[in-house]
Amino acid sequence: MDSDGRIHYRLDFRRGMTDADLDNAIHSLIYNVAHLEDHLLKWIDRDAAKRAVIHSTLREAREVQIIKDISNSDKHGDSDKHGDRRRGGARSGVSPRHGAIGV
């Protein structure tokens, strides 16, 4: 925990990948999880009941909202400016960031 009370984790999934390879794999994973809802909605097509289940399930999953915030931060540079403005910006209520690899 740092002086601001934030908790940091360090994980190493390198398996011989360079920093650039690992960074690209992480960005791809974040993007795919963040857009899972879009893919599921396209897959089920027009079934309103299933669409409602997907919307409510993924919107209630804080972990998914955090991934969406990281994806928006990577894309737009500041997740607090994008997302659900009714909650003050970020969907998850936190400001997650994907940090530098190898630091």
Image: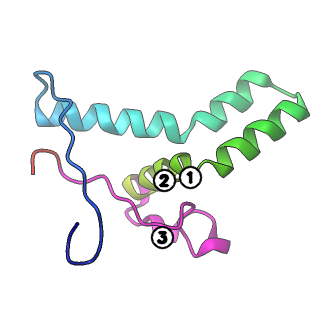
Nearer to us: label 2 or label 1: 1
Reading the image, the residue beneath label 1 is 62
Q: Residues within 10 Å of mark 2 (few under 14, many from 20)?
A: many
Per the rendering, the mark at residue 102 is none
User: Which SS class for mark 2?
Assistant: helix
Q: Residue at x 16, y 45 (%)?
A: 101
In what quadrant of the picture does the N terminus appear? bottom left
Q: Amino acid at mark 1?
A: Arg
Please tell me whether residue 79 is drawn above or below residue 65 in the rendered image.
Answer: below
Separation of residues labelled 2 and 3 (CA atoms): 12 Å
Residue 70 is situated, as x and y percent measured from the top left of the image, at 42, 53
Q: Quadrant of residue 37?
A: top right
First to last magenta residue range: 75-100
Q: Amino acid at mark 3?
A: Asp
User: Which SS class for mark 1?
Assistant: helix
Asked whether disc 2 touches disc 3, contact meaning CB atoms under 8 Å apart, the reply is no
Asked whether disc 2 touches disc 1, contact meaning CB atoms under 8 Å apart, the reply is yes
Please tell me whether residue 47 is drawn above or below residue 11 in the rendered image.
Answer: above
Separation of residues labelled 1 and 3 (CA atoms): 16 Å
Separation of residues labelled 2 and 1 (CA atoms): 6 Å
8 left or right, relative to 65: left
